Structures are given as structure tokens and as C-alpha cells.
Image (tube, grey):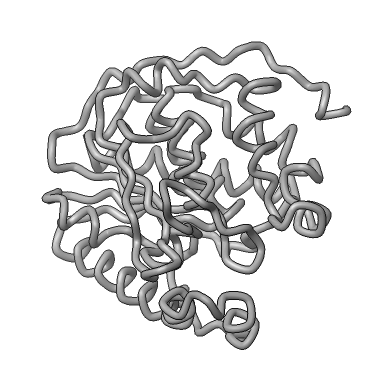
Amino acid sequence: MDTNSFTHPIIKGVPHTKLLPQGTALVLEGGGTRGFFSAGVFEAFMDEGIMFPYIVGVSAGSANAYSYISGQRGRGRLIIEKFVGNSHYVSWRNLIRHGSLFGYDFIFNTIPTRHIFWDKDVFDSTDIRFIIGAMNCETGKTVWFDKHELSPNLGEVIASCSVPLVANIVKHKGMDLLDGGVSDPIPIEKSIADGNNFHVIVLTRNGGYTATALKHLWLVKLFYRKYPHLIEAIKHRHDAYNRQLTLCEQLAREGKALIIRPQLPVSVGRATTDTAKLLALHDEGHREGAKAIRLLT
């Protein structure tokens, strides 16, 4: 099938019926197309009408939350089936032609307006706090954007998803922005700082994973020589990830967090386009989300 001409009957958003108590947060890791695990988790939440009063995400975690907040069951899985394998979605051709491995205009404009409708009305009317993190290249620190201030062109989420070296710097609100998953890979510290006392943390790596230092830092220094704080953030990204992961696991042991993560070894990379692998990861997310619901309700 020519996916460029594919149009699915509109999946209308369904408002969520079970808002969890204040102080309960949903914390979302990124991971490129590994984020379809999180989309599967959200399907389980939507099955039960469950919504969180507070959601914080970076990179693909924030992107996939859009369909969850708009209450559109099945939308994420349909995107995998019909569009992730399309070269406009992710490809080296995109990088060569447009400077970004992922085709953000295709993902955030073409798909939701021409192919698989995104129900912005339900998204806007869902009364929760939704926060997206992107990294300020000048400071190497995370900038946070609340739901009420998000731009119509989704500039904040595009910035949050823009991985260094394989995406363009996003100029937004007077700042130069890149992937929030560099400066805050698992935004648990933001959730704590905002006063939440229980955290449901969705990770896209299986247990036992630890991040390691970037091997080609010389390339980062070459590309971003005008941004010394950005270089430092990328250099120490693995330290930030491992610190935040350790904190998540400590909170889980203390009964202050619930971690949802893949149980099977993850063979999906950041830019994997293998439909079968991504659907399997999505469906594993659905199963793990359903298990977690029994512990939440």
C-alpha cells in the first residue's frame, strides 16, 4: 500500500473517566521508536479510562503522550503499521536532504492532518498538567514547557525529540533547543521538584541496562563548538541517565514509585523501522501497562 495515500477513518478521542489522585505523576523516558513501548502502555491506561493529573516527558515519551491525552485508542499502533516504515518518517535520506533523521513535519503535521487524525479538542480539554522538556543548547540545561503554553506547530515536542547530530537545532522562543533526553533522560527529578509523591515511571529499556559514555565525542565537539555547555551535557549524559535510573529504582523499593519497563531484551534501537519488532514492543507495553493497572487501582 502507498502509505502517502492512506487515510484511516477518524479515531475520535474519548475523554478519560478515572483521574488518579493529585500527587500521582506519570514520568516518561524517550528513546526514538523504542517509545512505542510507552504507546502500548498508554493503550492499557486508555482501556480503563485512566488519566494522571501530572505527566512529564522528554523526547519520544512526550510525543507519544499526545495520543494518550487525546484518548485515541489504537492510534499509536496504526502509525507503526502504516507509517514508521515510510522513508519520510525516519531515514538517512531525511538526514541528507533536511538535516534530521526523523521527518518531523511528516510526523507532526502530515500524519495527523492528512492520514490519522489527532483529536486536539480532547487534548486541549483534558485538564491535567502536561510538561515537555527540551535542552537549551546555550546552557546545557532543560527548559520545561507546560501544556497551556504549547505552540500550535508543536515546536516544543519537536525540539524535545531532536537528537544531537541527527537533527537540526530548533529555534524556539528565542532559544536554541535540542533533545530533552540529553539533559534529563528520565525526568524523575522534575516530578519530585513539582511536589508529586508517587511516580509511575515508563522506561523503554529492559532491566539491567546502564548507559555508557558516548564514543565519538570529537564529532560532538566539531558540530557544536559554539555551545560548550551543550558539549558538556552530551559528555555526561550517561551519568545523568544512570543517576536518574538509580533514583527511580530507589523510589520503587521505598514504595514511592512503580516502574513499567520491557521485560524481554529490547532489540529495538532509536531509529528502528522494523514493523514486526515495533508492533511486538508496543504489544508488550500494552501487557505491562495492564499489569501495572492492577497495582494502581
Q: Position of residue 283 (x, y in %)?
A: 56, 41
The N terminus, quarter of image: top right
With respect to residue 287, does 265 lie above or below?
Answer: below
Residue drawn 43% across the image and 55% down it: 175
Q: Nearer the viewer, residue 109 or 255?
A: 109
With respect to residue 212, does 125 lie above or below?
Answer: above
Q: Quadrant of residue 182?
A: bottom left
The C terminus, quarter of image: top left
Q: Position of residue 185 (x, y in %)?
A: 40, 64
Residue drawn 69% across the image and 51% down it: 277
With respect to residue 26, does 220 lie above or below?
Answer: below
With respect to residue 46, does 102 lie above or below?
Answer: below
Look at the image and tell me whether residue 80 can be seen. yes
* Residue furthest front as drawn: 174
Q: Position of residue 215 (x, y in %)?
A: 60, 86
Residue drawn 38% across the image and 80% down it: 239
Look at the image and tell me whether residue 262 can be seen. no
Q: Quadrant of residue 110?
A: top right
Taking the image as shown, residue 213 lies to the left or right of residue 251, namely right
Residue drawn 42% across the image and 51% down it: 174
Q: Nearer the viewer, residue 193 or 98?
A: 98
Q: Position of residue 223 (x, y in %)?
A: 63, 76
Q: Nearer the viewer, residue 258 or 196?
A: 196
